[in-house]
Image (cartoon, grey):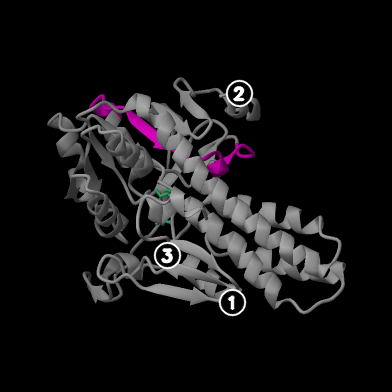
């Protein structure tokens, strides 16, 4: 990716000659460790274990995973190569089910591969396409961050959930991108960051990113959001998205739905920020978005330490769906989709015309 697009010193993912360099987000904020990955199964593990996470960044990782998978295929005929590449695509698609960006990126990679005349050309095309996806996703977050500015006034205090910054997107960020851009424009903004149980992306990553950039941040537990909204401390909520259905229903990190309901109750605007690669217009409503169910140990333990009795039953849905009626607007790189979304579909045309 073009380095001038980076506003921070770290990069969550980079292509380095014949390997992927990846910042292990599970070790942050204690350690900044970069992994060098040459094998697509390692990319799969990194995605599953949240070493790389956040919908757009997962898509970029999936695309580079396809490049690594292609490098490992020995077949010489185009037909056999494409068939084995499809097996790689299926395997990578199986890592995490909710973020649309992963499937969007893999579909793009497979469509690009077909255009190659022979195996060598396909491999070249795949690397080019992965870099293009990486670039475009970064650009999209820059554009949506600019578009979001009309909603952010100088002096705003913004509540956010999970982590949606450069780490999650490879660009400026989605929700955090808008906040970071506001800060770059000289607006005095501050953030209340939900810690985001169970894996603490808010506590570990959002605070880390905002402090590096110099934006004031107050860490709160997820259950404190309503308290601060009722006290009138929050001007608006901005969150990211993992998948947005055709009616605007939005899947995002577990806990987002509760924040949205609290925002409506307290008359606080609730904004979703996402690139259009996160939209899944094939799904009429959010009820059809697949929700990832993760290991119970992520709830019963924190960093390997048990916080519950042994063998207690725990549930761990990683995402929830916020119905469109709670969403004030969706901010994309193509423009802002404003209310009322209710009972109306977001069409391809609407997205293109914005
Ligand atoms: O499980 P994660 O850490 O991948 O979840 C990330 C989120 O829920 C983000 O809010 C979402 O991907 C949008 S951010 C760019």
In three-dimensional space, the C-alpha distance between marks 2 and 1, rounded to whole angstroms, equals 40 Å
211 lies left or right of 297: left
Asked if the residue under mark 1 is in contact with the one under mark 2, i.e. CB atoms within 8 Å, the reply is: no
The residue range painted magenta reads: 264-283
Question: Disc 1 designates what residue?
Answer: 39
In three-dimensional space, the C-alpha distance between marks 3 and 2, rounded to whole angstroms, equals 35 Å
Q: Position of residue 187 (x, y in %)?
A: 25, 32
In three-dimensional space, the C-alpha distance between marks 1 and 3, rounded to whole angstroms, equals 17 Å
Secondary structure under the numbered disc 1 in the rendered image = loop
Disc with the residue nearer the chain's start (2 vs 1):
1
Beta carbon of the mark 3 residue lies under 8 A of ligand 1 = yes
| Vertical placement of residue 1 versus 272, above or below | below
Question: Disc 2 designates what residue?
Answer: 353
Crowd class of label 3 (few under 14; some 14 to 19; many from 20; radius 10 Å) = some
Beta carbon of the mark 2 residue lies under 8 A of ligand 1 = no
Secondary structure under the numbered disc 3 in the rendered image = loop
47 lies left or right of 203: right
The residue under the point 45% across, 50% down is: 4
Q: Quadrant of residue 176?
A: top left
| Vertical placement of residue 206 versus 117, above or below | above
Q: Position of residue 281 (x, y in %)?
A: 61, 37
Q: Position of residue 216 (x, y in %)?
A: 18, 45
Question: Disc 3 designates what residue?
Answer: 50
**Which numbered circle lies on residue 147?**
none
- Residue 275 lies in magenta, yes or no? yes
Mark in the foreground, 1 or 3: 1
């Amino acid at each position: 990716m073009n380095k001038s697009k980076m506003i921070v010193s770290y990069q969550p993912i980079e292509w380095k000659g014949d390997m992927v360099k990846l910042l292990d987000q599970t070790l942050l904020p204690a350690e900044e460790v970069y992994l060098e990955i040459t094998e697509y199964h390692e990319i799969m593990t990194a995605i599953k274990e949240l070493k790389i996470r956040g919908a757009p960044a997962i898509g970029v990782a999936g695309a580079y995973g396809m490049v690594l998978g292609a490098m490992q295929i020995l077949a010489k005929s185009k037909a056999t190569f494409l068939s084995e590449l499809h097996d790689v695509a299926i395997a990578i698609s199986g890592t995490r089910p909710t973020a649309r960006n992963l499937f969007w990126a893999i579909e793009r990679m497979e469509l690009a591969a077909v255009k190659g005349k022979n195996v060598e050309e396909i491999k070249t095309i795949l690397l080019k396409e992965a870099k293009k996806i990486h670039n475009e996703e970064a650009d999209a977050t820059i554009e949506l961050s600019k578009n979001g500015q009309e909603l952010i006034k100088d002096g705003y205090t913004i509540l956010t959930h999970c982590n949606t910054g450069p780490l999650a997107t490879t660009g400026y960020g989605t929700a955090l991108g808008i906040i970071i851009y506001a800060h770059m424009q000289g607006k005095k903004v501050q953030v209340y960051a939900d810690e985001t149980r169970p894996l603490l992306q808010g506590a570990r990553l959002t605070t880390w990113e905002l402090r590096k950039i110099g934006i004031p941040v107050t860490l709160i537990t997820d259950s404190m959001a309503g308290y601060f909204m009722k006290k009138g401390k929050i001007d608006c909520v901005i969150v990211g998205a993992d998948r947005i259905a055709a009616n605007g229903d939005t899947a995002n990190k577990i806990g987002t739905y509760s924040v949205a309901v609290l925002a409506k109750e307290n008359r606080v605007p609730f904004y979703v920020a996402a690139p259009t690669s996160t939209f899944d217009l094939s799904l009429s409503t959010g009820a059809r978005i697949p929700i990832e169910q993760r290991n119970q140990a992520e709830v019963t333990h924190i960093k390997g330490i048990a916080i519950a009795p042994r063998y207690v039953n725990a549930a761990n849905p990683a995402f929830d769906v916020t119905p469109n009626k709670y969403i004030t607007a969706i901010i994309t790189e193509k423009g802002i989709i404003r209310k009322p979304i209710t009972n109306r579909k977001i069409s391809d045309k609407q997205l293109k015309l914005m």
